Amino acid sequence: MAQLNNDELLKWKKEIEAELADSTEIDALQEEINKLFTRLQVVSRVEMRLIGTPEHSDFMESFVQPIQRAFNEKNAELSRIQKEQWQRQIMLENINEEISIMLQR
């Protein structure tokens, strides 16, 4: 970590802590994922009844696959955000360690 003064480290620490505390984006994504999961459960039950019928393929293309794609995209986005949060947490730990070292001097 580049040499930063104590004020810069404390400012950076507060910014990262605020970012980590704000779970609005994760909560919204989780809510969307839950709704998509519920829709998938419903369309899957219908799809099971249509297996072997001429309507099955159309139903899959029109209903099941778009919901599955949206579900997968939202899960990928959630994973990306969680990875960013994990990286911020590591940065915060490094800052805390740097502050501790500075205070010991």
Image (spheres, rainbow, N blue to C red):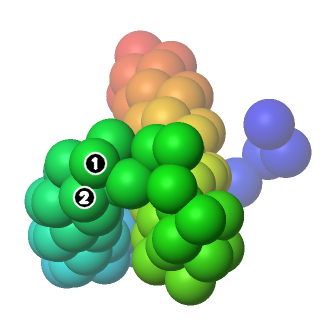
Q: Quadrant of residue 35?
A: bottom left
Is residue 49 visible to the viewer in this orientation of the structure? yes
- What label does residue 105 carry, if any? none
Circle 1 residue: 49
**Amino acid tagged 2:** Val
Label 2 secondary element: helix
Q: Is residue 27 above or below residue 63?
A: above
Circles 1 and 2: CB atoms closer than 8 Å? yes
Residue 87 or residue 78, whichever sits in front = 78
Give x and y (percent) for residue 15.
39, 71
Give x and y (percent) for residue 72.
56, 55
Q: Nearer the viewer, mark 1 or mark 2?
A: 1
- Packing grade of label 2 (10 A; few <14, some 14-19, many >=20) is some
Q: Quadrant of residue 89?
A: top left
Q: Quadrant of the N terminus?
A: top right
Q: Name, please, the residue furthest toward the bottom.
A: 62
Residue 8 or residue 37, whichever sits in front = 37
Label 1 secondary element: helix
Residue 105 or residue 62, whichever sits in front = 62
Q: Name, please, the residue furthest toward the right.
A: 2
Which residue occupies 45% across, 27% down?
A: 93
Which residue occupies 33% across, 42% down?
A: 48
**Amino acid tagged 1:** Arg
Which residue occupies 56% across, 83% down?
A: 62
- Packing grade of label 1 (10 A; few <14, some 14-19, many >=20) is few
Give x and y (percent) for residue 39.
22, 67
Circle 2 residue: 46
Q: Is residue 68 above or below residue 31?
A: above
